[in-house]
Amino acid sequence: MTAIESATQALLHARRTQQPTSAAAVPLPDAEAAYAVQRAVASALGWFGAAFPAYWKSGGPSRTATTTHAPLPPPGVWASPADARAWPFHFRGIEAEVALRLGREVGPELAGRLDLAAATALVDAMCVSIEIVDSRWLEAREAPPLAKLADLQSHGALVLGAWAPFDPLAPPDWAAQRCALTIGGGASQAFRGTHAMADPAFVLPAWLRHATRGGRTVPAGTVVTTGTWCGLPLAAAGDRVRVEFPGIGHAEVQL
């Protein structure tokens, strides 16, 4: 059995039994292998069928780091306010994010020549999003980076707030953008200009080049969430999580 097959079977077993498994037992050689595992798990579980994935996550720790990507299973993408009390989580990391929506389709030729300005011009709407980070690996947050990538970048679920218009010629002042996060009965946590890449749209060129590999076209209306503004604080079962980006909107989820 190849490394890709072993990792795929391990993740499928973890998802079907809702029991984490060891990433150390199924090492992957490179990012291409991790992306192959993503595709194999999605195919086995029938997440997308013949359709192009409508929701994605993309991000990285800095502008100089490699940006990584994952298509998100539709059953775990919810409109705010969301009720996640019945959803199986092993842990509940919280990422306060801004999601972007494409206003037109993007094929490989266009994706191949995008810079940040041209990619930003493709966006027609934005919304506040809450990603609940989880893992199918026993090592959870300490799993190897390639194992996390194979496991949809440790994706658990995504909550989307109401859509707001996005003007590419006058986007938000991201350096000044404020974000407020409340978890359970804890005090509100405040953030300002804390996106790792300084601009959520920075992920778009790399994401679109990845998503159009193999000649695929990304449809208009496809959504990508773009990375955390708050680090990764942990929530607990029973907590209600609220994220607000003033001027953009808010989102809530009951865990």
Image (cartoon, rainbow, N blue to C red):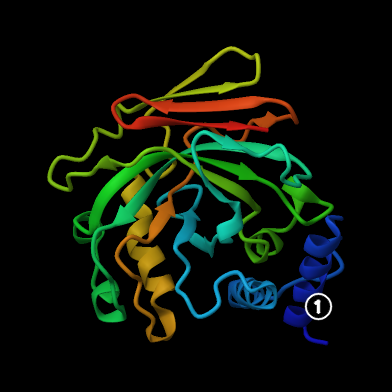
Q: Amino acid at mark 1?
A: Ser
Vertical arrangement, residue 97 with respect to residue 205, above or below = above
Asked which quadrant contains residue 37, the reply is bottom right
Image quarter of the N terminus: bottom right
Residue underneath mark 1: 6
Q: Is residue 190 visible?
A: yes
| Residue sitting at x 38%, y 76% | 212
Q: x, y (%) of residue 2?
A: 78, 86
As rendered, which of 215 and 159 lies closer to the eye?
Answer: 159
- Residue 23 shows in this picture: no
Quarter that holds the C terminus: top right
191 left or right, relative to 109: right
Q: Residue at x 17, y 44 (%)?
A: 167
**Mark 1 Cα shell of 10 Å, populated few (<14), some (14-19), many (≥20):** some
Q: Quadrant of residue 27?
A: bottom right
- Left or right, 253 with reference to 103: right
- The residue lying toward the viewer, choosing from 211 and 102, is 102
| Depth order, front residue of 242/213 | 242
Percent position of residue 183, x then y = 61, 23
Residue 34: image location, x then y, percent: 64, 71
- Does residue 57 appear left or right of residue 19 in this picture? left
Q: Position of residue 19 (x, y in %)?
A: 87, 55
Say whether residue 166 is left or right of residue 152: left
Q: Is residue 161 above or below residue 144?
A: above
